[in-house]
Amino acid sequence: MICIEDGNTRSVAAAIVTKQLLGTPDHLIGVPVTIKNDDLDRTFINLKLKKCGTVFATSKSLAMLLKALKRDKIDARFSHVWVSLDDFQKQKAEEKRRKQAAAEKKRQAAAKRKREAAAEKKRLASAEKVAKKRAKERKREFEKLNFTEKFVLEFVKPKRNEKKLSAITQEVTDEGGWPAFFFGLRINSVTVASSNTSVMLDIREVSTKKIRVALNRVCAISQSSWKIKRSNPAFQSGKAVGERCGVDYTPVNRFVYSVAFYSKKNYESRSLKIK
């Protein structure tokens, strides 16, 4: 147990002992210690009761303690290590500087986290706003489409909404048939495969460019063969896959193409290699 006299030098003396700084007596170096702070009278009593083995105090207080201990015939001696007031002040200033630096570092870290959190919140709010705006735009664009275009776009979605598809089909029935156009292409018929994995359109079109534009509008195509030829009788089939779906197309004759749309998952499961 180490007793330290209360006063201006208490915190610095404690730092010197616990942190093994300048002024630590040899017998305390590398030894775990317990510190007790008290006034001079209580410190004297603790010494007499052997609750303290070492005392840190001012030179004036140490002189008074030594005199009282000799009077009571208690053996005591000064350490050969002395710490001047200047050293105490330097240690105290250094300890204060370290605490201030640690507090400043903590404050800056907290401020940085706060700025980053505010920036992230702003970014998320902006992204959410943009997403909502785009969703509204997509909804408005979707509502402008005819029943054939709506049906195909809904059919190829990863999570197909069967109720929505049934509602569109019912509206087609109520209107007396499928619309004759599909993203600018004239169509003869619309058929859903018995396996419910694809929807097929017979397209009456002579412009391969218009066909490509329409298929890309639906699937956002990233890879395709685009081998559309009409060199009778060797008509060329082709295939394409994109962000939203996959498609196969086959020339039936000089004027008609059979086009099958699949969800991307169904298309990729067929393991068709695009060359």
Image (cartoon, rainbow, N blue to C red):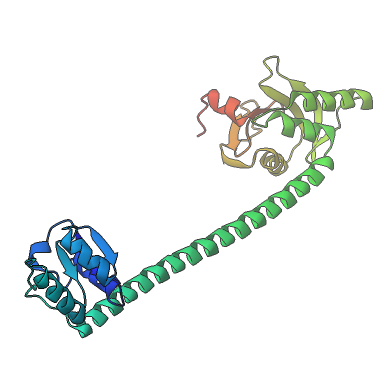
Regarding residue 220, the answer to whether it shows in the image is yes
| Residue closest to the eye, 103 or 142 | 103
Q: What's the residue at 21%, 70% (across, down)? A: 16
Q: What's the residue at 74%, 52% (across, down)? A: 133
Regarding residue 248, the answer to whether it shows in the image is no
Q: Is residue 57 above or below residue 166?
A: below
Q: Is residue 26 above or below residue 177?
A: below
Q: Quadrant of the N terminus?
A: bottom left
* Left or right: where 12 falls relative to 83: right
Residue 187 placement: quadrant: top right
Measuring from the top left, give residue 147's x and y in whole percent: 83, 32
Residue 208 placement: quadrant: top right
Residue 124 placement: quadrant: bottom right
Measuring from the top left, give residue 7's x and y in whole percent: 31, 75
* Left or right: where 150 falls relative to 23: right
Q: What's the residue at 60%, 39% (across, down)? A: 243
Q: Is residue 270 above or below residue 45?
A: above
Farthest residue in the top direction?
194
